[in-house]
Image (cartoon, grey):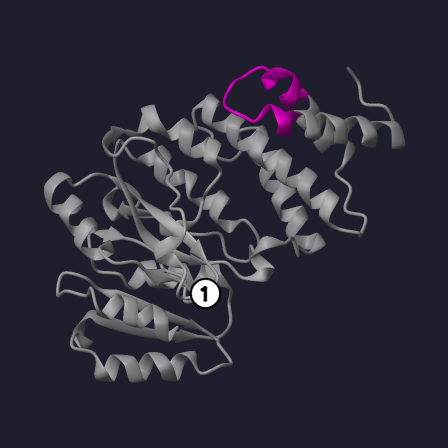
Amino acid sequence: MDQLLMSVETQLTAQVQLVLVCDGATDSSLAVAQRHIARSVWPECYMLLSQLNSGVSVARNLGIAHSTGRYVGFVDADDLLLPGYITQVLRVITGHQPDLIEIGFKRFNDISQPPTVKPRYLQHKAGYHQVKHVAPAVFQSNRWFPWLRIYRKAIAPDFRFEPGIGFCEDVMAIPTLYQRANTLHHLRLPLYGYREHAASASFNVSLTQQQQLQQFYTGLCRAQLYPDLPQQWRKILLLNLAYLFYSLQCGQQQDTSLTSQLRQDIKTLLLQQFFTPRFSLRKKLQLAGYLLRRNSQSAPLSY
């Protein structure tokens, strides 16, 4: 938390508001934030909120509700704003006023790493884009971290994360922004430092969380969720979710098998999209192999 706040403080200007939400933390995070604000050159730019532990979705929603700016971005407490974040984002807002702004990021484990780590980006080409032209690449990348984009509040005044979802709440929410946006500016600069813990590299997902994700897949597949999402975007999102199910099955010992209906839905999708270029052939083959193995262990799937 302290490292994050210092990375913000060195860039802060009067044009920026930072809403800090303490989600029932049992460590010293709240006290650290209070001390930092008391010493800040810009104490009026901070708003500190505290709530009983309610989960990341509720915390983000509280921050959105209390934000007063025209644009909203997200920062996680373990991460860093890299040099130039605020300056570059404000420059784009002033000069272009896009619906969405995307930024680059660097993964790191230690504070000394970010300058030497290879940056990652959502787009190959920097600058101003029509969302309909670049969204398929975003959906293909499957990077739904909220902090990778800043959105104009007017395009989605009702935007929220689903409470009670403890895994993949980002993938359930962020597509809304691409669906609502018309214009996008991609800043092909590494402006965010994402601290990767050992826990974030492995799957530790409860059965309830997997069931929530399966329900989301089913609703998306039947267009009960995101009914107006372009079909190409929907298919890419569904394929990425299907591969996530495969990865979860491979990574856990407990029996969390997919229902026969869900496997049938995934098989149908895979057959329809097998030769489309926007999804890895390796992943398609792995997914097909998993479905064939599961099919041989249970009742046959209809063809």
Q: Is residue 112 magenta?
A: no
**Is residue 112 toward the left or the right of residue 97 in the image?**
right
**Is residue 107 toward the left or the right of residue 209 in the image?**
left
Indicate the quadrant where residue 73 lies: bottom left
Residue 7 vs residue 30, the one in the foreground: 7
Image position, residue 91 (x, y; %): 14, 48
Residue extent of the magenta highlight: 268-284
Residue at 37% from the left image edge and 52% from the top image edge = 147
Q: Is residue 280 magenta?
A: yes
In the picture, the quarter occupied by the N terminus is bottom left
Residue at 44% from the left image edge and 53% from the top image edge = 107
**Is residue 133 toward the left or the right of residue 52 in the image?**
left
Indicate the quadrant where residue 42 lies: bottom left
Residue 176 vs residue 116, the one in the foreground: 116
Indicate the quadrant where residue 189 lies: top left
Give the secondary structure at mark 1. Answer: loop
Task: Look at the image and tell me whether residue 298 can be seen.
Answer: no
Q: Which residue is mark 1?
A: 110
The amino acid at mark 1 is Asp
Image position, residue 217 (x, y; %): 60, 36
Q: Tell me how many marks there are.
A: 1
Image position, residue 23 (x, y; %): 45, 71
In the picture, the quarter occupied by the C terminus is top right
Image position, residue 95 (x, y; %): 11, 41
Task: Look at the image and tell me whether residue 300 can be seen.
Answer: yes
Residue 116 vs residue 202, the one in the foreground: 116
Please, is residue 300 above or below residue 174 in the view? Answer: above
